[in-house]
Amino acid sequence: MDLNEQGILLPAPLRVFDCSANEIISFKLIRSEKDLNEKNEFGPEFTHQIFGENERIFGYKNLKVDIYCLSSSLNFYLNIDYDEKINPKKYNQFKADDLVESLNQWIPLSTTTNLDLFLSKLKNENEYLPFASTIDKDDPNWVIYLLYQQYQNDNGQICYAPIGFITVYLYYAYPEKRRPRVSQVLILPPYQRKGHGRRLLTAIYNDLRKDSRVQDITAEDPSDEFVALRDLVSLELCHKYLPDLFSKESILKTNRLTKEMIEKARDICKLTKQEIRRVYEICFLQSININDEEQMKIFRLLVKQRLYEPLQFDKRRRLQLADPTLEALATDPEKRKKYLSTQYEYVLEHYENILRAFDKYKD
């Protein structure tokens, strides 16, 4: 059995050699030597790709893994420190995980364990080379959008530090269209929660919406964080480029999502129909008095109708829902009612957060 998968199931004497990879790995971005002493390190969010599903490392007591990275060139320094490594002869042939072998699959071959050698490369930070993720660089349909920061190093040289990137794949759409799909999104932890993701995604929409061949912009398996980011950017785009349709006056006057809204939001902002519905709901909430019970009832029914649609059977074709849980919700009125109520409260809270962010960034 893979020891990384055993975790707390290990016998008591061996548990001191077991640890969570997420807790003992630390990253730090370096622009100058003084950064070594700054408290600006951050840990990984996930490590299952490297250390298995349970994200654990076995074989070292009080393990600490430090990974330093030069901000511009992305040269790496690796330091592995521990008090004791397990002795297979003493502990029934239990062996330590090979940390270096596991990490070497994910960090550059140029990574050094010599701190002086690592720091000596600081003088060349002005020779920044753009980085890319592990995608097929020979496929012309991949587009990588980079966000970086300009700064001066200790020698007064201009350097460029990557802040994050988003990759987009240009899928074909019949007959002569494209459907760009956002694939990977990364804003480095020290730069998160500062509006950089919003600026980068907005730049991507503004770039792609100029292309008449682009039908709309989709996303691959979006996380909750990305859904929130996309909702905010979509809301801003509709207010900026379609103010006559998504203004408070227009929303209250039409009192429904119109065909014109759908067509123009798709043609001009490159939003999918599903995203347009979400933007309309946000705008509706933005336009009404939340203390008005009748207006909130209309909003609640609007949201629940969208939430209910995936639960409906296609009675004519007698198709069943792919997810057994959703199928149960579709056939059990009480479960469905509870589910829709819970989901509505989640959507309401989500939209309120989006509107707070919208007000924060509003010019």
Image (cartoon, rainbow, N blue to C red):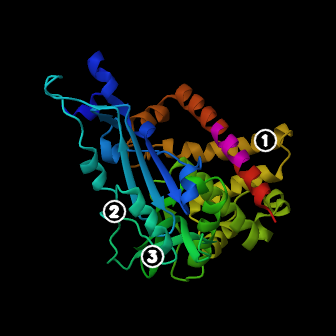
Q: Image check: 353 left or right of 310?
A: right
Q: Which mark is residue 296?
A: 1
Q: Residue at x 50, y 66 (%)?
A: 166
Q: Position of residue 255 (x, y in %)?
A: 78, 56
Q: Position of residue 289 (x, y in %)?
A: 86, 45
Count neighbours of disc 2 (C-alpha within 10 A) and say few if under 14, some if 14 to 19, many if 20 or more: few
Count neighbours of disc 1 (C-alpha within 10 A) and say few if under 14, some if 14 to 19, many if 20 or more: some
User: In whole angstroms, how far apart are the C-alphas of marks 1 and 2?
Assistant: 54 Å
User: In whole angstroms, how far apart are the C-alphas of marks 3 and 1?
Assistant: 53 Å
For marks 1 and 2, the one nearer the N-term is 2
Answer above or below: position of 161 versus 327: below
Q: Which residue is mark 3?
A: 129
Residue closer to the observer: 306 or 248? 248
Q: Main secondary structure of the magenta part?
A: helix
Residue closer to the observer: 149 or 302? 149
Q: Is 352 colored magenta in this rendering? A: yes
Q: Which residue is mark 2?
A: 108
Q: Residue at x 79, y 62 (%)?
A: 362
Quarter the C terminus occupies: bottom right
Q: Image check: 200 left or right of 289?
A: left
Q: Position of residue 116 (x, y in %)?
A: 41, 60
**Magenta-highlighted residues:** 346-353
For marks 3 and 1, the one nearer the N-term is 3
User: In whole angstroms, how far apart are the C-alphas of marks 3 and 2?
Assistant: 14 Å
Residue closer to the observer: 92 or 274? 92
Does residue 43 appear anywhere in the picture?
yes
Label 2 sits on a secondary structure element that is loop
